[in-house]
Image (cartoon, rainbow, N blue to C red):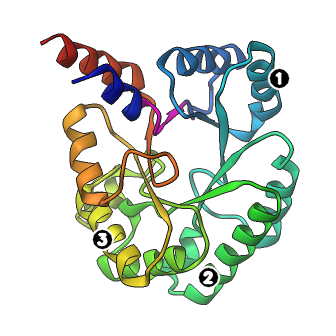
Amino acid sequence: MEKTDIEKIMNVVDHTLLKPYAKEKEIKKLIDEAAGLKTYSVCIHPLFAKAAKKYITRKNYPLKIAVTVDFPMGVLTTNARVKILKSLAKDVNEVDFVIQTGYVKSKKFNAVQRDVNKLVDIAHQNNLIIKFIVEDAYTTKEEKEKLYEIVCSSKADFIKTSTGFAEPEYASSMNNKIGADPENVKLMAETIKRLGSKTGIKASGGIHSYQQVLDLLKASEKQLDPKEFRLGMSGTKKLYEELEKLKTN
């Protein structure tokens, strides 16, 4: 494990703190940690977007700000989602939207497609990167296939596996794992290839080890490039320490 390899891995990480009870000082600590680890971005709730932007600017950190929207449920109307997106445009670089889960479960895929296309258009008009969280723990194989196709046939920048906040009971009732699963990432990669899409893949939820990173990267068929592949992680420091140990062994 070379130092350059560690830097390449860190450079695809969205260092994350999404606990609803996180305080502003903890967000600042996250930002300092992200800067020290040289991650690509921090991923936080919109509540602290302005404060994060001010802090990053003051500290002159080369960090992007990503915020989650309609998280973790995916229950808002498109009009509400559009308003939130427009209100965030000046303070953030990237937005991670949870897909409208109830519409997916109701087989209202035309509505999902309209929502995705509308949000992509507005995000790109405002020079924002947009990712869609498809919450794999909640969907059947058939729903995944349809949903992945909708996201990857749009001009969305990324399709993202999970919120990390899915209900275990419902997920297990469908024989789904919570978090980033290489099998789902492989299906995303196959969909992207079949459609000739340029959509990137963001694996998030329960990633703690280098082996998981390797498995997810291989399944994605992507490069360690933040324009193609991302890791959403709260346990970034633990991964960094593991990589450092591998460097010295």
For residue 178, which numbered disc appears in the image? Answer: none
* Mark 1 / mark 3, whichever is N-terminal: 1
The residue beneath circle 2 is 113
Front one among 192 and 212: 192
Crowding at mark 3 (Cα within 10 Å: few <14, some 14-19, many 20+): some
Q: Residue at x 44, y 75 (%)?
A: 148
Residue at the spot 51% in from the left edge and 23% down from the top edge: 38
The magenta-colored residue range is 10-16
Residue 147 in the image: state x and y as whole percent. Answer: 47, 77
Dot 1 or dot 2: first in sequence order is 1
Q: Do residues under tags 1 and 2 come within 8 Å of each other at their CB atoms?
A: no
Name the residue that disc number 3 marks: 187
- The total of numbered circles placed on residues is 3
In the image, farthest residue toward the top? 248
Residue 227 visible in image: yes
Could you give the CA–CA distance between mark 3 and mark 2, rounded to whole angstroms? 19 Å
Disc 2, SS: helix
**Residue type, numbered disc 1:** Lys
Instruction: Residue under label 1, please give it.
Output: 54
Where residue 103 sits: x, y (%)?
57, 78
Q: Is residue 119 above or below residue 146?
A: above
Task: Name the secondary structure under disc 3.
Answer: helix
Q: Are there few (<14), some (14-19), or many (20+) residues within 10 Å of tag 2?
A: some
Q: Residue at x 67, y 43 (%)?
A: 67
Q: Which residue shows up at 18% across the image and 10% down it?
A: 248
Q: In the rendered image, which quarter contains the N terminus?
A: top left
Query: Which tag, 3 or 2, sits closer to the chain's start?
Result: 2
Quarter occupied by residue 76: bottom right
Q: Check residue 72 for magenta coloring.
A: no
Query: Which element carries disc 1, helix, strand or loop?
Result: helix
Q: Amino acid at mark 3?
A: Leu
